[in-house]
Image: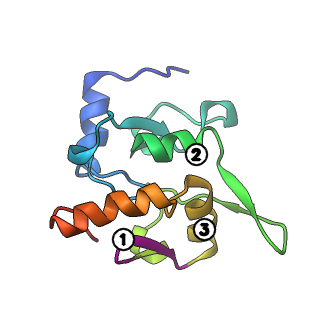
Amino acid sequence: MNRYFSDEIRQLVTIRASGLCEYCRMPDEFSFFSFHIDHIISIKHGGKSEPDNLAYSCPYCNRNKGTDIASILLPGNEVIRFFNPRIDNWPAHFQFENARIRPLTDIGKVTLLILGFNHTERIEERQILIDSGRHIFE
């Protein structure tokens, strides 16, 4: 499987995401680092390098997600898949509460925890964007 993407694929994924991380909704225009094209289902788990399996991801979400596709939700030890931007609706799983992101479902909970949506530096980053009127909420 190809881990590198053509300019056409990169453009398609970026435009489809409206320049927002498809996991945490951070706008790419305010990131010091380039956003990534993420395999939603990683190659090692059988995912393909095709548009239906690709997401636009900020470096923070991409690094935390890695090749994971699910996590265990305690206390019940139930395996729950991560949010999939190709089949899931973000507002059905998450809600902004000022600079924090609140999970609304079990999928939201495991995604938020593993991707670190509410780590201190991420909340501070969102607060700066909110204070400047530049964060995009959906």
- Asked whether 69 falls inside the magenta stretch, the response is no
Q: Residues within 10 Å of mark 2 (few under 14, many from 20)?
A: many
- Judged left or right of residue 43, residue 29 is left
Residue 109 in sight:
yes
Comes first in the chain, label 3 or label 2: 2
Front residue (pair 136, 119): 119
Q: Position of residue 70 (x, y in %)?
A: 68, 54
At a point 26% along the width and 52% down the height, the residue shown is 27
Residue behind mark 1: 99
- Judged left or right of residue 42, residue 97 is left
Front residue (pair 99, 104): 99
User: Which quadrant does the N terminus fall into?
Assistant: top right
Secondary structure of the residue carrying numbered label 1: loop
Specify the farthest residue to the left. Answer: 133
Residue behind mark 2: 65
Instruction: Report the span colored magenta.
Output: 97-104
- Main SS category, magenta section: strand
At a point 55% along the width and 53% down the height, the residue shown is 115
Comes first in the chain, label 1 or label 2: 2
Check contact, mark 1 vs mark 2: CB within 8 A: no
Residue behind mark 3: 107
In the rendered structure, find residue 23 and report the number of the disc placed on it: none
Relative vertical location of residue 27 with respect to residue 110 in this rendering, above or below: above
Q: CA distance from mark 1 to mark 3?
A: 20 Å
Relative vertical location of residue 99 with respect to residue 85 in this rendering, above or below: below
Foreground label between 1 and 2: 1
Mark 3 is on which residue type? Ile
At a point 44% along the width and 71% down the height, the residue shown is 101
